[in-house]
Amino acid sequence: MIQKAFIFLAIGLLGFTTITRSQNLVNGKKIYETRCLVCHQADGGGVPNMNAPLDGSSNVIGNDIARLVKIIKKGYNERVALDGAYYSNAMTPNPDLTDAAIADVLSYIRNSWSNKASLVTIAQVKKTVVKK
Ligand code: HEC
């Protein structure tokens, strides 16, 4: 009896995790399409010399989540080499995105096209301190 209950609980948790995971990515895709696609393109390939690609970017799939959170919140116009190339456009900031929305859009870009990396949690976004 207890074993049965445990199995149901385990299956339920697994199902729940799968649903919330795909829900994050669905939300992330919506945010991407309304805010990011215009520059980074539907295929995540960016525009050569102008808008950095997100597909295949070592930073996007890397472990520095705090850097990614800052870029989304504050925008980005550093003109440093990204995987050896430079981009002339300035990325606009997104000060109105909630922590959950930032977690979703980062999870989406880390798991789209050829990218495969861990999902970003709301806790990871919250603990990133971004100066006003
Ligand atoms: C106005 C065009 C524009 C929009 C809109 C935009 N970006 Fe960007 N993004 C850029 C440019 C240009 C760079 C590189 C800037 C530089 O090199 O200084 C960049 C850089 C980045 C980087 C760093 C890439 C790396 O390899 O380090 C990430 C991550 C990123 N953008 C994600 C996003 C996400 C997610 C959105 C939507 C919420 C978004 N961007 C919206 C133009 C844009």
Image: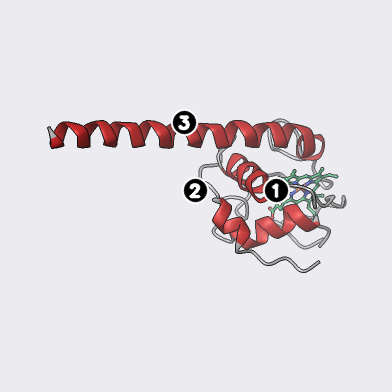
Q: Position of residue 128 (x, y in %)?
A: 64, 64
Query: Does 43 appear above or below 103?
Result: above
Determine crowd level at label 3: few under 14, some 14-19, many 20+ residues with C-alpha closer than 10 A.
few
Query: Does 102 appear above or below 2?
Result: below
* Front in this rendered view, residue 124 or 59: 124
Q: Is residue 83 visible?
A: no
Q: Position of residue 55 (x, y in %)?
A: 64, 41
Q: On the image, which quarter does residue 32 sit in?
A: top right
Q: Residue at image x 64%, y 37%?
A: 28
Q: Residue at image x 84%, y 58%?
A: 77
Q: Position of residue 124 (x, y in %)?
A: 56, 58
Residue farthest to the front? 1
Q: Type of residue at label 1?
A: Thr
The residue that disc 3 covers is: 19
Instruction: Give the mark, 1 or 3, whose residue is nearer the N terminus.
Output: 3
Q: Mark 2 touching mark 1, by CB under 8 A? A: no
Q: Mark 1 touching mark 3, by CB under 8 A? A: no
Q: Residue at image x 71%, y 36%?
A: 31
Q: Type of residue at label 3?
A: Ile
Quadrant assignment for the N terminus: top left
Q: Mark 2 touching mark 3, by CB under 8 A? A: no
Label 3 beta carbon less than 8 Å to ligand 1: no
The residue that disc 1 covers is: 98
Q: Type of residue at label 2?
A: Ser
Q: Which mark is residue 31?
A: none
Question: How many angstroms separate mark 2 from mark 3 (CA)?
Answer: 16 Å
Determine crowd level at label 2: few under 14, some 14-19, many 20+ residues with C-alpha closer than 10 A.
few
The residue that disc 2 covers is: 118
Question: How many angstroms separate mark 2 from mark 1 (CA)?
Answer: 20 Å
Instruction: Give the mark, 2 or 3, whose residue is nearer the N terminus.
Output: 3
